[in-house]
Image (cartoon, coloured by chain):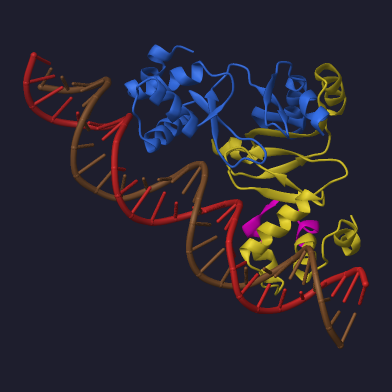
Chain colours: A blue, B yellow, C brown, D red
Amino acid sequence: MDIKNILNEKGLKKTKKRIGILKVLENVEYPVDVLGIKNKLIKNDIEINLSTVYRALEDMAGVGIVSRVNFSGDTRVFYELQHEGHNHYLHCLKCKSLVMIDMCPLREYQKDLAKKTNYELVKHNLDIYGYCPKCQEKK
Amino acid sequence: MDIKNILNEKGLKKTKKRIGILKVLENVEYPVDVLGIKNKLIKNDIEINLSTVYRALEDMAGVGIVSRVNFSGDTRVFYELQHEGHNHYLHCLKCKSLVMIDMCPLREYQKDLAKKTNYELVKHNLDIYGYCPKCQEKK
DNA sequence: ATGCAAACGCAAACAGTTTGCATTAATTTT
DNA sequence: AAAATTAATGCAAACTGTTTGCGTTTGCAT
């Protein structure tokens, strides 16, 4: 994703704060929530109001620059850059750690399903929950 | 699931309100949110306080009678009876309709993944998003 | 029937998110 | 390059969904 131009290309204004948000998302391994983004910006000396972060992300999600993610048992909204592909996560129910799953077993399945149902399918979320090796020991 | 006895079996007290909640969940096609449950109870002349619904569901989720569900772009928590199997949903992004997907392509995949990662996997969420046939016409 | 713990209602607190409005900054027009 | 236009921002307040403390009620074991 070309952070330098994407905002203008999508009809949004290219501001320091929005670019800052995109850089945060670019450097982060997992989806971040709004407060997390604000905190990372402040570490980089970019003062920003929470509602600005909310609005920027909503706008950018609207034009497909970022996408919303949410996880079971957590009411917060997380964001990530809109990936060419898509990500799936393995969650530890105890320590809340997150591991990305590379392989997606659903591409073919989604195609079949689209045919059967006549839906036009655009994305899917897959999250798998369990206990990581460390937390199994503790149990 | 045997609504008559499950509460006592799991060490919870069998009250009218909790039984009412379970009956609501039994008669509902899709996961319901807490307010939805309260409204359905009131229609059945069961007055109940919202916090009672919250606490009852949390307790029942704790002992595995019900399970929490959440959907992309909606921060509310939904509940359903804990199924022997599990459910996956097909979401229309426009009209927000929900269709249950019977077949789960992930059973084998989850087993493999558990072996590879040494996680003890307990559940997964799969939600597929797109546009239903009706909403495709409107576009 | 009595006593104890769990379940309940109510009000208040809380967390995350959204909104209205006045101000500032980015892009467009001149 | 300056002026005009419109989007983006900060701030305070509102709002929604959820949680908590506490006094009262109910279910259930004794």
Q: Position of residue D27 (x, y in %)?
A: 83, 72
Apparent side of residue C8 relative to residue A20 in the rendered image (left or right): right
Is residue A2 shown to the viewer in this render?
yes
Residue at the (67%, 29%) spot, across then down: A124
Apparent side of residue A60 relative to residue A104 in the rendered image (left or right): left
Q: Which residues are magenta?
A: B24-37
In this picture, is C19 found above or below A57?
below
Query: Is residue A26 located in the magenta-colored stretch of the structure?
Result: no
Q: Position of residue B88 (x, y in %)?
A: 76, 38
* Frontmost residue, A20 versus C15: C15
Residue at the (72%, 50%) spot, across then down: B79
Residue at the (77%, 29%) spot, across then down: A135
Q: Position of residue B84 (x, y in %)?
A: 88, 44
In this picture, is B56 found above or below A28?
below
Is residue B30 shown to the viewer in this render?
no
Apparent side of residue B58 relative to residue C28 in the rendered image (left or right): right
* Frontmost residue, B44 versus A32: A32
Res B27 → quadrant: bottom right
Res A43 → quadrant: top left
In this picture, is B14 found above or below C2?
above
Residue at the (43%, 35%) spot, across then down: A54
Query: Is residue B30 located in the magenta-colored stretch of the structure?
Result: yes
In this picture, is B115 found above or below A115?
above
